[in-house]
Amino acid sequence: QVQLVESGGGLVQAGGSVRLSCAASGRTLSSAATGWFRQAPGKGREFVATIDWSGAITDYVDSVKGRFTISRDNAKNTVYLQMNSLKPDDTAVYYCAGRRSARSSVRADEYDSWGQGTQVTVSS
């Protein structure tokens, strides 16, 4: 199983940008699809973005399309989530997740490794 550690969260004003990183250890991420999910207070975990093993295929929840970009650097065993034009509704704990399959997925139950999460708070 791969260990995932997120970083880069914090407090940002609406309209600002944040880049989250997800560093892997214990098993390479280079052959695995990776996703970002988020959970806002009082809400369930929500899919945000996913990327296949090569970085060629990505998918996003409609609410972040055009604002967020998922990418990966397999040489560094790291996946990123660039978040621009942030809104207060983006406030949540953001989780990185990895799966053994090389194919990306929007389903949380198809990921078998999860990070501890990083808080992103967007102030209005």
Image (cartoon, rainbow, N blue to C red):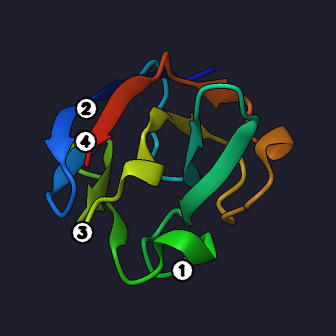
Work out whether residue 50 or residue 89 is closer to the camera in this orientation and state it. 89
- In contact (CB < 8 Å): disc 2 and disc 3: no
Tell me the distance, in whole angstroms, between the alpha carbons under discs 3 and 1. Answer: 23 Å
Of marks 2 and 3, the one in the foreground: 3
Q: Which residue is mark 1?
A: 57
Name the amino acid, label 2. Answer: Gly
Q: Secondary structure at mark 3?
A: loop
Between disc 4 and disc 1, the foreground one is 4
Number of the front mark, 3 or 1: 3
Sequence-first tag of 3 and 1 = 1
In the image, is 76 to the left or to the right of 46?
left
Distance (Cα) linking label 2 and label 3: 15 Å
Which amino acid type is marked by label 3? Ser
> Would you name the residue on which mark 3 appears?
85
Residue bearing mark 4: 123
* Residue assigned mark 2: 9
Q: Which mark is residue 30?
A: none
Considering only order in the chain, which callout, 2 or 4, is on the residue closer to the N terminus? 2
Residue 70 coordinates in the image, percent (x, y): 38, 64
Amino acid type shown at disc 4: Ser
